């Protein structure tokens, strides 16, 4: 059985070990490639301050690149008896390089290792989520343009209210995603700061060059105060989860609309038969299960910030093992949200729109405001026009024209989709993912 990094002469009780390790080894597989990147930056810095020779650095970097490739292929394994990803990487190095592998831990703790692993993992996952959101955004804007002239009822209190359009409906969710990504960008900037070198939360007596590791890993800056760097554990995850929950909120609302509009009572949209499921006893059923599961998953994701908050809200400064439990809810959340984004993108692309909704008489009264406004423009005071139309409706004499003439910004006749595209592109460009990508590529190519 492999010895733990912290173990000396006394072995911990088996049941205690099982309880305290929990799902950590499973969760650490998410972090494996990022743990390797953090080690590559750290040892490159150690060589500059004389704790490694140039030859030792070259051997270590070559072996770490090999381990990185294994991790990227999903073939990295934390062996039985090995406590975590950090221990497994060090074990693999010492097996291949002997005592040289034992030198990589100088000047750091597993505390700042997992901090930097989490930040590198989260940074990469935010980029993936941003790209998926941008894809869905473009689909929604394209559908908004395609169906911008198709009217549909707008609702308040789930009562038919005023004319809306599919241009407005699709476009509204597109703009919602833009705001969601603005929040995610703020979370990204908080995430994109380097904690490496804070060690166990109180720094090191080695003359570490934290500016160098910040540059090597492509961070915008560092978490300067070493105590705050450690305090960032849990805080970063909570902030990022709030941004993820905002995206999930948009998807959940869209999914609810789609379920409603797809039902026979509405009949506003139709999903391809291949995108629906059936019933075991009702042969006519075509259920929108993708949207229903999306709604449930996204509602669950919206609880993520509260879960993390409840784990961390009564912890003082310094490291505590409580923080390990955050991994179990935080790390898988990106895959879950990504799956929802991919599914919703597929559904939005292939749904068809009913272009004859207003042939149904039940929607005739939604033009009442249009008629009030038409009479007001003709010179009748608004309150008088409102009363005239109301009395006509009550007496059954109301028979308005079913056309609309909205011209102001963001209305049926002036969707401002071009402005919304510009807004979204500005937000996406503001992440500046290229900086991190370029730095990581350079790090992987170092001799």
Image: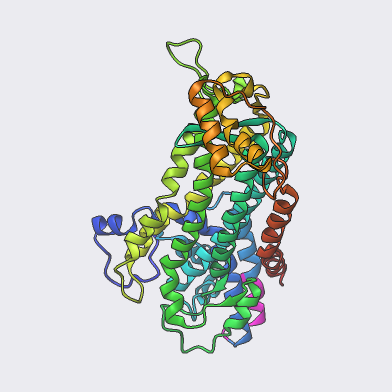
* Residue range of the region highlighted in magenta in the rendering: 51-60
> Going 57% across and 49% down the picture, which residue do you hit?
74
Count of numbered badges drawn on the protein: 0
Is 171 located above or below residue 125 in the figure? above
Is 325 located above or below residue 191 in the figure? above
| Quarter of the picture holding the N terminus | bottom left
Coordinates of residue 72 in the picture (x, y in percent): 61, 53
- The reply to whether residue 77 is in sight is no
Color scheme of the displayed model: rainbow
- The reply to whether residue 249 is in sight is yes
Is 201 located above or below residue 410 in the figure? below
Majority secondary structure in the magenta region:
helix
Is 127 located above or below residue 156 in the figure? below
Left or right of residue 380: residue 421? right
Coordinates of residue 248 in the picture (x, y in percent): 50, 47
> Going 68% across and 64% down the picture, which residue do you hit?
430
| Quarter of the picture holding the C terminus | bottom right
Out of 116 and 359, give the one closest to the viewer: 359
Q: Quadrant of residue 316?
A: bottom left
Coordinates of residue 308 in the picture (x, y in percent): 38, 59
Out of 103 and 428, give the one closest to the viewer: 428
Left or right of residue 393: residue 63? right
**Does residue 441 belong to the magenta stretch?**
no
**Does residue 52 belong to the magenta stretch?**
yes
Left or right of residue 152: residue 200? left
Out of 434 and 447, give the one closest to the viewer: 434
Coordinates of residue 299 in the picture (x, y in percent): 43, 44
> Going 42% across and 11% down the picture, which residue do you hit?
281
Q: Quadrant of residue 55?
A: bottom right
């Amino acid at each position: 059985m492999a010895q733990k990094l912290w173990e000396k002469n006394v072995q911990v009780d088996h049941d205690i070990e099982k309880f305290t390790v929990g799902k950590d080894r499973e969760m650490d597989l998410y972090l494996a490639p990022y743990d390797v990147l953090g080690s590559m930056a750290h040892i490159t810095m150690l060589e500059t301050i004389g704790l490694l020779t140039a030859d030792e650095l070259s051997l270590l970097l070559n072996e770490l690149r090999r381990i990185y490739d294994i991790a990227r292929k999903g073939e990295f394994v934390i062996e039985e008896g090995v406590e975590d990803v950090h221990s497994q990487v060090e074990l693999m190095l010492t097996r291949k390089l002997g005592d040289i592998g034992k030198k990589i831990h100088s000047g750091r703790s597993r505390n700042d290792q997992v901090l930097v692993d989490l930040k590198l993992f989260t940074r990469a996952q935010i980029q993936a989520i941003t790209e998926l959101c941008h894809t869905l955004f473009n689909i929604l804007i394209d559908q908004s343009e395609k169906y911008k002239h198709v009217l549909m009822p707008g609702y308040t209190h789930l009562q038919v209210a005023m004319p809306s359009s599919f241009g407005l409906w699709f476009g509204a969710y597109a703009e919602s995603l833009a705001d969601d990504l603005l929040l995610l960008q703020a979370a990204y900037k908080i995430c994109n700061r380097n904690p490496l070198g804070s060690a166990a939360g109180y720094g090191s007596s080695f003359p570490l060059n934290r500016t160098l590791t910040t540059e090597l890993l492509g961070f915008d800056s560092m978490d300067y105060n070493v105590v705050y760097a450690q305090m960032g554990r849990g805080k970063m995850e909570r902030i990022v989860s709030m941004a993820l929950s905002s995206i999930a909120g948009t998807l959940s609302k869209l999914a609810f609309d789609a379920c409603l509009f797809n039902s026979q009572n509405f009949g506003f949209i139709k999903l391809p038969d291949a995108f629906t499921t059936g019933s075991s006893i009702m042969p006519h059923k075509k259920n929108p299960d993708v949207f229903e599961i999306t709604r449930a998953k996204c509602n669950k994701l919206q609880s993520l910030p509260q879960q993390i908050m409840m784990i961390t809200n009564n912890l003082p400064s310094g490291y505590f093992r409580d923080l390990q439990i955050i991994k179990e809810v935080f790390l898988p959340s990106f895959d879950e949200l990504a799956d929802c984004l991919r599914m919703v993108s597929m559904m939005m692309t292939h749904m068809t729109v009913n272009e004859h909704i207003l042939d149904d008489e039940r929607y005739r009264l939604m033009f009442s405001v249009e008629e009030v406004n038409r009479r007001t423009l003709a010179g009748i005071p608004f309150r008088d026009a409102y009363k005239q139309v109301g009395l006509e409706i009550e007496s059954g004499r109301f028979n308005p024209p079913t056309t609309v003439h909205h011209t102001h910004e963001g209305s049926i006749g002036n969707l401002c989709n071009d402005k919304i595209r510009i807004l979204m592109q500005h937000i996406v460009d503001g992440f500046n993912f290229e900086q991190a990508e370029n730095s990581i590529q350079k790090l992987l190519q170092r001799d």
